Every structure is written in C-alpha cells, then in structure tokens.
Amino acid sequence: MVSVKLWGSLRDLADGQETVEVEASNFKELLDALAAKYPALKPQIDRGVSLAVDGLVYRNSWFTEIKPDSEVVLMPYMKGG
Amino acid sequence: MNFQSNTKANFKVVGTRVPRPDGVDKVTGRALYGADFNVPGMQVGLILRSPHAHATINSIDTSKATALPGVKAVVTSADLGVPEDESLRDVQDNCLARGKVLYDGHAVAAVAAKDMATAKAALKLIKVDYTPLPHVTDVDAAMKLDAPVVQEARADESVPEGCGPNVTHYCEFGHGDLESGFGMADLILERSFTTAATHQGYIEPHACVASYGTDDKADLWCTTQGQYFVRDLCSGILGIEGSQLRVTASEIGGGFGGKTTVFIEPVALALSRKAGRPVKIVMSRVDVFRATGPTVSSSMDVRIGMTKDGRITAAEAKLRYQGGAFPCGTVDMGAQAAFAAYDLKAVRTQGWNALTNRPKEAAYRAPGAPMAIYAVESVVDELCQQLDLDPLDVRILNAADAGTKSSYGPTFDQIGLMATLEAAKEHDHYHAPLGENQGRGLSCGFWFNFGGNTSVSLAINSDGTVSVTEGNPDIGGSRASISMMAAEELGVAYEKVRTIITDTSSLGQNDVTDGSRVTFAVGLATIKAARAAIRVMCGRVAKIWGIDEDAVVWEDGAAKPSGPNAGDFEPMTLADIAAISSETGGPIAGHHEVNAEGAGVSFGVHLADVEVDPETGATKVLRYTVFQDAGKAVHPDYVEGQMQGGAAQGIGWALNEEYIYGDDGRLQNAGFLDYRIPVASDLPNIDTVILEIPNPGHPYGVRGVGETPIVPPLAALSNAVSRAIGVRLHELPMSPPKILKAVMAKG
C-alpha cells in the first residue's frame, strides 16, 4: 500500500481524509486506484494532476515507479509561463 | 562506455559566453517575426471586437460586409463547431464570442479582404445587435453572492457551498496546527493586499498567416511559444486532423507566457478556409491589450505569527484571483508557492478563482506566484520591522532547505535557497549605506519548474558539422544553450553546431516553451541524442578496427581504444568518422524523445534600493541585485539576461503597470503611453549573482531560470518603498499618486 497525501481541498472528496492509502506501484496505477476508491476525485484527476514522489514532481508519467515507502503527494497539474 | 553518467562537472563549452547565434539576424533585421511573413494571394484579416463589457449577442448581420467588393470571407462563431472538450471550447469562445460577449474587446466577427482599407470598411458594415448586461471587473465584487453572473454554472466540484456564482475553483494547501502555532507567537500580523492585472508586454504583437487548401491541408505561420500546442488547439477548433495542419513558429519578439495559447490563429484559418486564399492577421497594440491575456489580479489576506527572536510559528494566506471571463486554475499555483521559501510547522493557504468581465487570463512568468509571495514577503518584512529584526537573518532562520516539508506537500531535496540568502548577506549591496528618503527591500522568490514532452534530432553531417533540430521557439537563448550542450557532449567546437527550430510536421511532439523547461528538457534530450550518435560512431569505429564496441570510448571528440588491451589505434575524430559515413553504413544521427521529469525547483533572492520623492511620490530604483540558483549556467549571459529581464518586469508590476477599467467596464489604458512599462532610463544596471547548486535530475545539473526572477521584485520594491516613506503599503502598483496619498496620510 502507498500513502498518498491529498491537497486540502480534495479532503471533502475523499471521505474527509487528507492522507489515503491505495495499492499501486506506479503513477498510473495510483491514479486509477484513487479514482476507483474515491470517485469524487475523478473529475480533478481527469482535468490533470501532478504527483510528487520523494520530492520530485511528475506530470503525466504513468510508469513512474512508486515504492511502498515513497513520500507521495498529489498536486494540481503544473503550468508555467 | 558509460552513457548514463549524470555527474559531469568539468566543462569546456558549457559555462562560456559564446556569441549568440541569432544576434546578427536580429540587429540587421534579417530575422523573420510573425508579421514579416507573406505569401502570394494573401488577404488581410481584421477582427471586429465588442464595445461592451458584457452583453448578449442577439444577432450578427454580415450580409453587407460579405457583399462589399474585395471581401473574400466573413466569419463568426457560427463558422466553427462547438468542441466537446470544455477547455478547448473556452479557447474557441475566447477567439470568437458565442452567444454573449464577455469583456470589452472580445472578438465577435472577422473579415478577409484584398487590402486593409477594404477590410476596415467591411468591419463597419457588420451589424451586431447587443443587449448590454451588468458587468463586474473587480475580484472582490465578482465573488459576492449578488454579483453579475459572467457565465452560468462554471464552478467545479472543489467550490464549497455558499460561494457566489462567479467562483469557479477553490483550493487549499498546508499542514500543521495553525491555532497552536499562532499561540506560540509573540507578534501576529494580519494584512490585506491587492495587485492589479498586468500584461506580459511583449514587443511583438500577435501575428499569423494561415493558408487552408481545398484539400483540407493547411499551413499556419505564427509567432508563438509552442507551435505544437497551436496545432493541437487549431486542429481541434477547425475539426481537422493534426497531421493535415503544419504550424511553423516565426522568430518571437517576447512571450513571457502570453503566447502559450491562441487568439487569432483559428480565426485566420477559418477565414482562409472560407476565402480559399491565405489570410494574414496582425493584432494592433490596442487589441493586444484588450483581448490577449494579462495576468490575474488579486485580493489577498495574510496572517503570520513570529517569536521575538524571529521564528515563524504559523502562517496562513487567503488568495482571491480573477482570471477574466473563463475559469482558470492559476490560484492553485499561487497558493502552493506562497510560503515555499519557509520551513513551517503550521501553514495553510486557501485560494478562490472568480470570473469577471475581463480578458481570459494567460500565463505570465511563474503564473500566480508573484502576487502571493508579494503579500507573504510584505508581512514578513513588517514583522521584522516591528520586532526590530534583520530581515535577511529572519529569512535564513526560517529558510526551507533539504529535508523541509514544503508548504505545498512534498519534502524538498537539494535546493539553493540557503545559498542565495547567504550570498545576499555577504554581498556589499546589503551593507551599503542609505540616504534620506531611501529604503532597502528584499524578498525571496520561488518557482516549481518542469520538464515535459520533448523531441530532438541530431545529425552528424558528412563534413564533420552537427545539425540539431528541436521544436521549441527560442525565447531566451535556447538555440545557443542547446548547441553548447551538443558541442560539449560530442567534444566539438560550438561553431560546428547549428540548432534550428522546426515545424510540427518534422519532429515529434514538443510541449510549449514555458515552465522554464527548455534549457532543462531540450538540453537533456539533446545530450541524450548526442550520446545516441556517439554510440553509432563508436560502433562504426569498432567495425573498422575489428574490435568489440565496448572496447571503444569517446573522449575529446574522438573514438579511442578503451585501453591497451583494446589494441593500438589512432583516434578517429567526429570529422574522420563523418567523412566516411557513407561507406560505413550511411548517415549518422541520434535522437531522443522523452517526457522529461526532474526539473528541480528554483529559488532566488532580490535586493532593491529605492529613493522616493516625498513631493511627487515618484520612486527611483537606485540599486538592484538578483541572487539565483541556476543549477549550472549553460550560457551565463543568457542566465543573467533572464534574471535582469524578470527583475525589470517585476519592477514595472510593482511601480506602474495596471489594467484600469472605467465604470463602463471598458479598458481605459490600452497602449504603452497609458500602460507604463519600465524603460531603460527608469532602471539601474541590475546586478546578478548566479549560484550553481547542480540539479541531480539533469546530466549537467541544469535548472530552469526563466520564471523565478519575476517573483521577488514585487515585495522587494514594496518593502523598500515602505521603509523609505515610513508607511507600509498594501497595494500594487505603487504609482506616484498612491505613494503620495500614503505619505500625506502619515502627516
């Protein structure tokens, strides 16, 4: 299981939890598991999210490996100028 | 040989100040910008824009315009479909209004005619029947429950119950027990701030030429930060396949985020499709101001608690952004960036986005971050003043570092904030004396940086030169830095390499030139493309020598035996190998495609000295120094240029720039005479100090540098002015009348 920290405004969409646990070994599995377990998160996931894994931020990298002890933080999709 | 090395430290080309490859073209006028492109049979395209801030379009009668001799086509939103994708629909509706006009300057219809006079005459013949609606342009007013509704039902699922109808998005970040943290503070300050919308202010207005064939194949030439994104948006809007639309980016006269979307390009294509002729559209400066993306404006509350010795015990911010008439998520970025420079046990940021009757926001360097960090850094500075603490010491005491749990969630790896703060403290600028009516301000800045989709092709030419083909418009010197990294990796002279930016049909997908990504991501792909070419060259040489490939290494631009056991062979240079490539297997090339990750965050610290004229309220910037971590500065001139350019734009944002709307909801200052950006005589030489803390995610340690420098100037200037006049200011821009009012109120 991987612990995923959600940003605060997603808490109400995940049964009031700020940290949730899902079974996943990479970015794609994690998003699929989150959307399956907490369907209210799916619209945000579909609009786009980033994922910080052990401090590095990834956008749309499905096969990014996630270890069970990785620090995983869901973040809004990064955009720049 | 080892092709995976991420530890390069000794450079021969990278880090030098080679001549810029676009210099001669740009100073002689040979460089072709968007408006310089012409094709035979080209028609002039012009766009009719709304005179209302908000109105229902009852009807558009184009019959007289269409009948005017010399007019080849007239289009409205009726000539386009309605995309299923909501964000694409918003882009399209911003290019040509559908049903309602949502801001002053919103495009309504367009004509293509044989010449400018005919096009202007045709625009006057288009009759639009409007019913004006109540409007709102201020973010706080827009958030009220009874505000005029800009668009119905655009809130996403994040918006809590009880918000006004224009609120489209809500976000929240942070950790820890705020009230417990505030309970440990000796002083708590809570302040409210506003910042005005500002424009990216690029010199070159938007321009494009569209040529749509009767076989549904189309070409588009335009000034843009991302030709692939333009292709994706335009093909979606026009309903054609991406492969049938080739987009070529011109030389670009500045973008700063404002050219990361489309405004006129789908309109030109629609006109060309209808006219059967190529169509050129060039925006006027007035139209650029009225109808292309400025940044968000903001209204913010910040509360911070601090102990007597300068430790921040708790911090929170509430950010209210408006991004114009369409939903935008820029407040997410501001809310994450606001406290990124601090190691905090208790922190929370909340953000709301509201619709207003203003142009659709477009990205502007570190979108969302400058205003949030302005508010935070202003309160930190005031706390330092009231507690009689050195503001730089307080930043150092509270600075985020490796191992800090960031305010937006992840734990930081190696970051350069502490190094920049310490460099600022050691610099003589921080210790120089100040005179009467003068003040010094400082601010930290932060930006995330990212990588993204990147495709690079590198060809070894038979004469021993190298051609690099990439797909990101060069807005900050990337052709030089890409050539330098190719030369470094291949071991050839910089002058042997030429990098060109190609069209969408010639190379795989490349994300937009944004997010400070190009030197990082395209550089990374170039290095790996060069390594792929080296692998081919080593293989060819191994065959010539009759030894294993593993027994050949690449050093100083040549293939060599890996050691005495590999045999005794004279090294073969890149030129030697290239000259016989036809005989050894054909052309030699390397390419690399990647969705690059590992960009690494960026921090900077700015110091500003100002003098305020108490009689006029005018501010003169006396001295300015930028300290920033560049990871590895590939071409220091360009890195310094980014740092200076960001500072100059931020100084303008702080002192003068603002979108001013009248009571009628119309923009009052759509031109550079009334929207005042800094000119050379307004600014001192901006000094720069480049720190190099290598980014472990890049083979040469490179970090993006383009966006962070615009973040700190807002607070650095506000802190300097506030200290100079002895009154704390909470509103940007700090134009002379506002400063004078504050000085007079002080008495």
Image: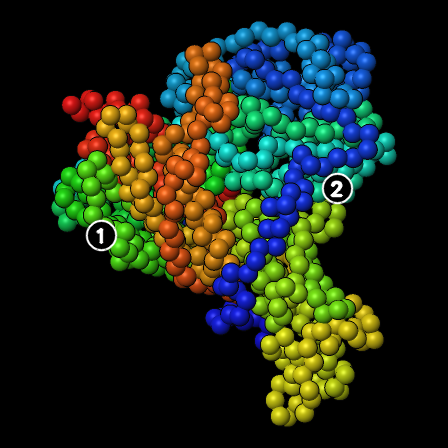
- Tell me the SS state at disc 1: helix
Q: Amino acid at mark 1?
A: His
Q: B2 and B457: which one is in front? A: B457
Residue B216 percent across, percent down from the top left: 82, 34
Task: State left or right for residue B734 relative to residue B570.
Answer: left
* Residue A19 visible somewhere in the drawing: no
Q: Which residue is mark 2?
A: B246
Q: Residue at x 52, y 40 (%)?
A: B256
Where residue B353 sits, quadrant-wise, is top left
Q: B106 and B491: which one is in front? A: B491
Q: Which residue is mark 1?
A: B431
On screen, residue B549 above or below B509: below
- Tell me the SS state at disc 2: strand
Which numbered dot is residue B511?
none
Mark 2 closeness class: few <14, some 14–19, many ≥20 residues within 10 Å = many
The Cα atoms of the two marked residues, 1 and 2, are separated by 56 Å
Mark 1 closeness class: few <14, some 14–19, many ≥20 residues within 10 Å = few
